[in-house]
Amino acid sequence: MLIEDQRFLHEDLERLEQGISDRISEDPRHLRDRLTRDHQISGFLNRIQEQSKRLLDIYNDAEGVRSKEIQTISTGDPFDEFYKHMEDIKEHHRRYPNEPVENLERAYKHKAPSDGDILTSEVDNMFTGEEAYGRFLDLTTQHEDYLNLPGVKRLTYLQYLDFFDIFTPPQCPIKRADKTTDQYFKYVGSLADYLESFLRRTRPLEDLDKLFDSFDSDFETAWNASDVPGWGVEVRTVGPAAPKTEGTGEGIWCPDCEKEFKNNNVYKNHLTGKKHTRAAEARTERQAHDTNGDSNGAVNSRGSSVQRLKERAIAEREFRIQKLASTTQGERNDTRVNVERKQGMTERERQMELDALFAESAEPLARNGDDESDSDGDEKIYNPLKLPLAWDGKPIPYWLYKLHGLGVEFPCEICGNFVYMGRRAFDKHFNEARHIYGLKCLGITNTTLFREITGIEDALKLWDKIQRDKKKEKAGVDNIVQMEDADGNVMPEKVYYDLQKQGLL
C-alpha cells in the first residue's frame, strides 16, 4: 500500500533526525568514539537522502498510483478496503512466518553496553596500528614503493615524510622520461588513493567530493595554461639536438648522461663506463626516433598526443597528491613527531604503548551513577614526579623528561611572567602570538630582532638603540657633501680630499 509506504518513510526520517540529534549532543572522550559517532551520523545522512528521494518519487506520482489509491479509499466503503488489506497482510505472514519485524525505534537508538559487554565499532577495522585512529599517516608501503623506483636516492622514512609531495628537482631525482613508466604511475596512484582514503576515513562529515572536484578544476586550469610544475610543453627542434647548457659552466658537461664533471680525468674514465654507454645508446635511439617522426608528420603527431595523454594522467595524480598533502598538513607534522619519538624508544616501550592503545580502544563506555565514580577512582594515574602526560594520558618516561630538559624553567617577562618548561617550548614561543602581542604592547613592531630577549627593560633598551641608530644613519646620509672632480666623477667630500692629498686627482 503506497500510503503506508509514505507514512513509513516519514517515520523513518523522523527517527533518523532524532538519532542524529542524540549523537550530536554527546561529547565522546576518546578519538575512537568521536570517529564512531561521526561515521554513524554520516550513514544516517546518506540514508536520509535515499529515503527523501523515495518519498519525493511517491509525491510526484508519475504513474498516478497514489491518486488512484487515495480515490479508492475516499469513494468506496472504508471497511471493505480495510479488510482487504488485512487479508493481504495475513497472507504475507502466513507465507513468511519467521520474517523479523523492523523496529525503527531501536534501529537508530544509541546502544549502551551491558555489564561486561564490549561494543565493536565500525572504525576498529578502518585504521592500522600506526595510524592510531586517524592521528597519524601510515606511508610505510608507499615509502617502500618509492625506494624500488629506478634512479631514486635512498631516503629514510622521516625524509620521505618531508619530500613525498615534491616531484621536481632537486628533491625528486626522477627524470621526466622515467615518470611515464608503469611502475611510477602505480606509485603515484597508490599514494593519491591512500591520502584520499585517509581523508574519507578521518573526516566523514565533510563534503569531500566537492573538495576533490575543486582539485580537478584547479588542475584543468593549470594544465591548460602549462603551469603544472615539471610538465610544461616540450619544444622539439628539427635536426641535430642543440648543445645543452645545464651545469655551472665551470666543469665538463656530458650531454648523454646530463651530468657535469669537475675533473677532466674523471670525465675520461666516465666515458668507458657501462652507464655512459647505455645513456649514449638511448640518446642515439631518441634522435633516430625524432628523425623518423619528422619524416612522417601524422605518425609523429599521433605519438606525441598519446605521450601527452600519459603525462597528463601522471601530472594529475602528482597535482592531487600535493593538494591532499596540504590538506593533511597537521597529521603530517604529527606523524613526523611521532616517528621521531618512537625512534628514541626501546622495543619493549613500543609494545607497551601499542598494548595500551588497544586496551584503551577496547574498554567499555563509562556507566552512569555510582559506576562512573568507581571508574574514575580506578583510573587515577600514579605520578609522584609530576611528569608531563603523553598523548595517551599517561606520564612520559623519566629519561625522556630529562633528555628534553622539561624540568628546566624558562620565565618570560614579556609574556606576563609565563613559565615555559624545556628549551624546545621556550625557543618555540618567540614565534607564538602571546610573545608577539607582548612586544607590540611595548610599541615594538620589528619582532624578529628580539629573539632570546625576555625582559621588558632589555627589550625597551634595544628598541631605543635601534631607533637611535636608524636616525643617525638617516641624518648621516642626508648630510653627506658630494664633490665632483675635473672628469665629472661624483664622490663624498672625505673621499675627494683623501684622493687630493695623495695626488690622484
Image (tube, rainbow, N blue to C red):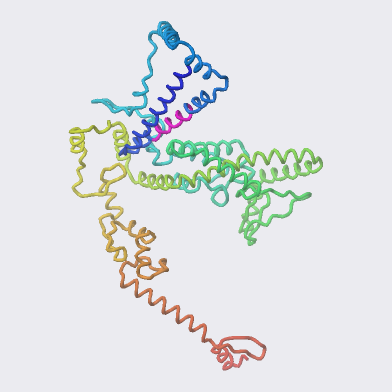
Residue 122, quarter of the rendered image: top left
The x, y position of residue 131, in whole percent, is 40, 38
Q: Residue at x 40, y 66 (%)?
A: 447
In the image, 226 versus 63, the foreground residue is: 63
Q: Is 481 situated left or right of 288 in this image?
A: left
Q: Is 57 situated left or right of 304 in this image?
A: left
Residue 133, quarter of the rendered image: top left
The x, y position of residue 30, in whole percent, is 32, 38
Q: Is residue 315 above or below residue 128?
A: below
Marks counted in the figure total: 0
Residue 442, quarter of the rendered image: bottom left
Residue 44 within the segment the image draws in magenta: yes
| Magenta region, main secondary structure | helix
In the image, 424 versus 469, the foreground residue is: 469
Q: Residue at x 27, y 51 (%)?
A: 401
The x, y position of residue 274, in whole percent, is 64, 44
Q: Is residue 146 above or below residue 55?
A: below
Q: Point out the stretch of residues depicted in magenta.
A: 38-50
Q: Quadrant of the C terminus?
A: bottom right
Q: Residue furthest right?
A: 295
The x, y position of residue 218, in whole percent, is 58, 46
In the image, 64 versus 278, the foreground residue is: 64
